[in-house]
Amino acid sequence: MSFSINGKTAIVTGAANGIGLAIARHFADRGANVMCADMDEKRLADELGDVAEEGNIRYFAGDLRQRLTIANLVSATIDAFDEIDILVNASRQVTETQALDPEDDTVATLFEQNVMTALRLSQQVARRMIKQGEGRSADESIGSIVNLSSIAAHQTRPELLGYSIASAGLEQMTRSMALALAPHRIRVNAVAFGSVMSASLKSSIGDRPDWRDEIENHTPLHRIASPTELVDAVQFLASDGSGFVTGDVMTVDGGRSLLDPVEAPAH
């Protein structure tokens, strides 16, 4: 089996910065057609404006919490590239929760942003993949969906209550959708990462410089990963090389989840 994604078409959400941007650029460099989606139109234009609308990269700005926006994203991708072979749900929000405050709405907010958006987009994209797969060989995979989760689903801190619940929900959604879509030859997997120098973590460390030392001291490889270190794992799950892998949550965390739960932020 090949790990190549050359010629395939991928939607990557959260593609204006950090991990999503790294995945989008990596996929494009490997020959995939990439639709980069994010709410931040200015940042998309700043990062991709020089290359978008030419060759194999396009970008789409909109709030994917809105069902109409999801439908428009799918339509824009088909208009640009005819088909959709890969979906990477990399859009996520990290917000602290006041665990004992009944007025705190971050659990609902993060569940909507990190789980429901990924679920609704996966449903829409899967419908398109199923239509594309009509007439293809019965043993041929017709699509791959990759969700980005976090070890916060299993290791957490009180202030990450909402993020942890959303991460756990995303992983269970991954397994459930894998079963639902397996008869249609669509694979659904996830990558659960530890501390990656994403935009959210960079902002958190700016407010709490001591967090960097905490993270590194509780990571066996003793460092924070760069966004580019996740992309090969995502490519593997998106490619035909993982053709018999579905419902799996691959952990990329420098060994951190091998340790007992610790008081270090699990971004």
Image (cartoon, rainbow, N blue to C red):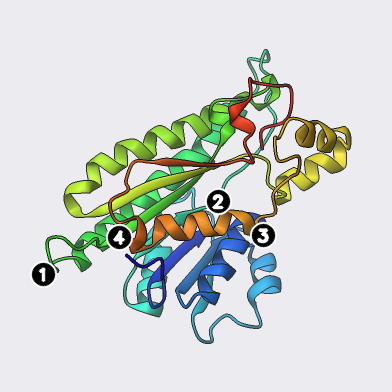
Q: Which residue is mark 1?
A: 135
User: Contact, CB < 8 Å: mark 1 with mark 2?
Assistant: no
Residues 219 and 73: in front is 219
Query: x and y percent of residue 236 in the render?
Result: 44, 58
Between the C-alphas of marks 3 and 1, the distance is 38 Å
Q: Secondary structure at mark 3?
A: loop
Q: Amino acid at mark 1?
A: Gly
Q: Which residue is mark 2?
A: 91
Please state which of the two labelled residues, at mark 2 or mark 4, is closer to the viewer.
4
User: Contact, CB < 8 Å: mark 3 with mark 1?
Assistant: no
Query: x and y percent of residue 200 in the render?
Result: 71, 45
The residue positioned 35% from the left and 73% from the top of the image is 78
In the rendered view, would you say 62 is above or below 177? below
- Decide which of tag 3 and tag 1 comes sooner along the chain: 3
Q: Amino acid at mark 3?
A: Asn
Please state which of the two labelled residues, at mark 3 or mark 4, is closer to the viewer.
4
| Residue 236 visible somewhere in the drawing | yes
